[in-house]
Amino acid sequence: MAVRRAIISVFDKRGVGRFAKELQELGVEILSTGGTAKVLKKGGIQVKEIPSLTGFSEMLDGRVKTLHPVLYAGILARRDNKKDLEGLARYNIKTIDMVVCNLYPFESVTSQKVSLERALENIDIGGPTLLRASAKNFKDVVVVVDPGQYKEIIKELSEKGDLGEQKRKELALKAFAHTARYDGVIAHYLRRSFNGDSFPRDLVLPLELVKKTRYGENPHQRGAFYKVLPAERDFSLANARQLHGKMLSYNNLLDVSCAVECINEFEMPTTVVVKHDTPCGIASAHSLEEAWKHAWKTDTASVFGGIVAFNREVTEEAARELSRLFIEVIIAPGFSGAALELLERKKNIRLLEFPDLFPKSIAENREGSLAYRSILGGLLVQDRDTKKIDPSEWKTVTKKKPTKRDLDAMVFAVKCVRHLKSNAVVFVKGTRTVAIGEGQTSRVGASLTAILKGKKKIKGSVMASDGFFPFRDAVEVAAEAGVRVLVQPGGSIRDKKVIGAANEYKIKMVFTGQRYFRH
């Protein structure tokens, strides 16, 4: 079915004048609405305006332009259906063979802080209806939603006189995906604006492809990174900019996400080193260089091929130290010119600039956001863990009481342990980790793993656990290694025995009442 009549009604007018002119040169009659019609006429294109077909002018400040049976009958009529064509003839309605439409910019408007009234005015009504109607009848109607496709459509019309069925299907699918995304963004925005249920019966997540990865977790798997829309206002890795290096892998992105989540806890200059989606070194200090040195010393072997995050601009001095090691990715709010020059000499390192990493409170960056994880055939959804760590809520349960200095170290330790894979323990001195044990099937196993790595560095440290101690054995192991302070959630049926063990070994112990599992 050749294209003889086309409706063009677009908000994004890039290239539309040239496209309409080329259609007209191919003998296509152009129908259009208000603003688009003015642009086309100004470009010397003959346009028949919609009101001349429907007999109704635009109404309600443009809210009603295309909602009329004359248009939708012309779009939805099946050309191979005798009754449909008889129905058109009865009312002297002509068929419409192409619909060129894109929508009010709800997504870009609401990416900024705007009033609800303005947001609502940018919800397109007629546009999605045009797109869905024409996509539904793709066998007879060409639907065009993307200005980037104008050129290929003209080429095929010029060479073949029409578009083939496969191309029509592709265009229809793109139109349905476009309207689904549009409605998803609106639902997502209004759910937030209306303080709607975070876990509704029907959860629509608008997603957009950021990039395909070279492969998934392994070379035989495919992978891609999608962002949840709108990303502009969210604390999202989609807003990070790659300055140097080859394409990020699926595993790189998992590690970077873990590093960013963790470092967002800290306000002082901080370094987080991540390997296999879990931190293996964390330190805060008065300078970035000192923070890096202490984070690296936690586990010098695991830094090899790891991910490093900073919450301050990377300096030349820090870059010089980093350039001596094999590091997969460095992510930071920025890089000094000299640092960038040094690091860019390493061909395989990836450098990510992420201004949002400049310290903000964890709640400020992620308040109200959700965490998603895929499981077989579905999705798990939960609130992100943004609960503030408040030592005033903690309870000292041993005879020996912690000092202010102890409490500061415990707060740092809890901030670290909440980002480790369970079962997890962390040993810290001041604001630096000296050993980390994570991903074990028992608390004592995590302790032994960390002590094996930390050795003599454990002596005099503060130990934090993401879950309660079910038995006194973890206390005994900690005491033998030289731990002087323990901080844990508490809540075990054997708490009294665990407290007794701590008193026996003259260890200070505090219950936080807050578990931090991370599976």
Image (spheres, helix red, strand yellow):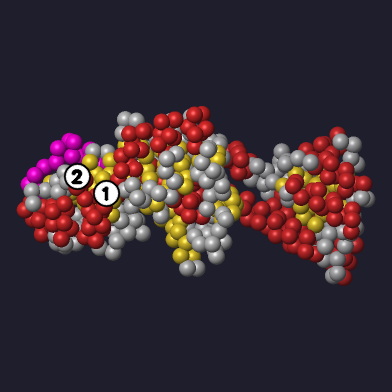
Q: Residue 493, percent across and down? A: 16, 62
Disc 2, disc 1: CB below 8 Å? Answer: yes
- SS class of the residue under badge 1? strand
Q: Is residue 282 above or below residue 439?
A: above
Q: Which residue is mark 2?
A: 461
**Residue 65 at x, y percent in the picture:** 76, 45
Q: Secondary structure at mark 2?
A: loop
For the C terminus, give its image quadrant: bottom left
- Crowding at dot 2, Cα within 10 Å, few <14 / some 14-19 / many 20+, comes out as many
**Nearer-the-camera pick, 246 or 110:** 246
Q: Main secondary structure of the magenta part?
A: helix
Q: Which residue is mark 1?
A: 435
The amino acid type, in three-letter code, at marker 2 is Ser
Name which residue lies at 16% across and 52% down: 481
Name the residue at 33% across, 52% down. Answer: 420
Q: Which residues are magenta?
A: 398-414
Q: Position of residue 194 (x, y in %)?
A: 49, 46
Above or below, 141 relative to 122: below
Viewport quadrant of the N terminus = bottom right
